[in-house]
Image (cartoon, rainbow, N blue to C red):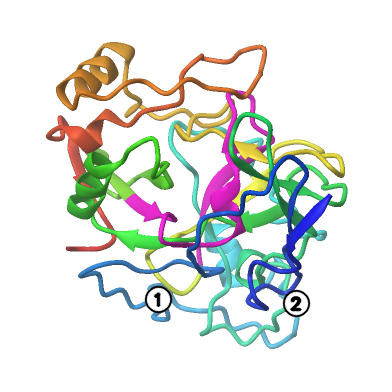
Amino acid sequence: MVTITEDISMGKEKVKVPVVNELDGSRPTEFGYTPVCISGPNVSVPFNSPFYPGCGCQQALCTKDKCSCIQSYGPSYNEEGCLQIFNQPTEFSQPVFECNSHCPCSRSCQNRVVQNGQHLQLQVFKTYCKGWGLRTLENIKECTFVCEYAGELISIKEAKKRAQELTDETGNYLIVLREHSSNDDQILRTHVDARFHGGASRFINHSCNPNLIMVPVRVDSIVPHLALFAARNIDSGEELSFDYSGEFDYWHSHETNDEHHELKALQDQRKDRKSCQCGAVNCREYLPFDSSLYSSESHQAISPVNG
């Protein structure tokens, strides 16, 4: 095993994230490391301006019988900090609200998980057929927070522009998260691109049977953290994966693209479908493709950012 670097985060994570290559002499392409999302071109977002009032808890640790945040939006986590909303299936991504900077509780509060950052031992490694990947170096319990999908927060307009510029050489690091807005006729879309700036999560590969699920978590901004939680118990040494389409057993989006629209969008752009190498029994053979980034919207969509 050849260690490329002891810590690709360069001290920006609480734990080192090493990079190893057991197959050849290649190295990951250069990018700017960031553990959290940053503003992309022409995007100005108040990441530290809470849009809901903090709790009035006077103790260091909030309790569900006294904390207004937990009473209003939770409880989202159990005493071990594990997500506990899997038993509440919805048709779109179900958001989580943590205590924010207006709350007097401590950083060790039960309702502060994602904002405390990555704490697990993870490792970037070269895979046999999927480029680079990310694996865990320790056992992970189901529903545990693993890491955040960090990158540039971009507008719908910029997302479409970047999607049309993608090639096999550039790779696709653009993730689109969909949520219900307060208006049932609208969908709130968050676009994060980790191609030029991102964290260790940018190396996570797609799987049609993933061991991670993406959950929008809000702390000090209307813009959510794209938090990845363990969908089941994960063994040490196992590669991490999530479904790039956003679909999962618990949450399914009405905005999924059927195969006909996907193929037409690809043909219009003279692009080929990329085969999926996840190896799952239920593999869909091709990587998910968001045709909405190549065509005009057929539904009302809004974004937490402008630009």
Frontmost residue, 70 versus 273: 273
Residue 237's place in the image compared with 269, above or below, is below
Q: Residue at x 26, y 48 (%)?
A: 162
Labels 1, 2: front one: 1
Give amino acid for label 1. Phe
Left or right of 113, for residue 227: left
Residue 134 horizontal/vertical position (percent) = 68, 47
Q: Position of residue 124 (x, y in %)?
A: 69, 52
The reply, left or right, for residue 192 in relation to residue 84 is left
Q: Position of residue 113 (x, y in %)?
A: 67, 65
Q: Which mark is residue 108?
A: 2
Q: In what quadrant of the picture does the C terminus appear? A: bottom left
274 vs 138, nearest the viewer: 274
Above/below status of 301 relative to 59: above
What residue appears at the point 47 percent right and 41 percent down from the top-left corner? 93
Q: Quickly name the residue at label 1.
A: 47
What is the magenta range? 190-218
In magenta stretch: residue 214: yes
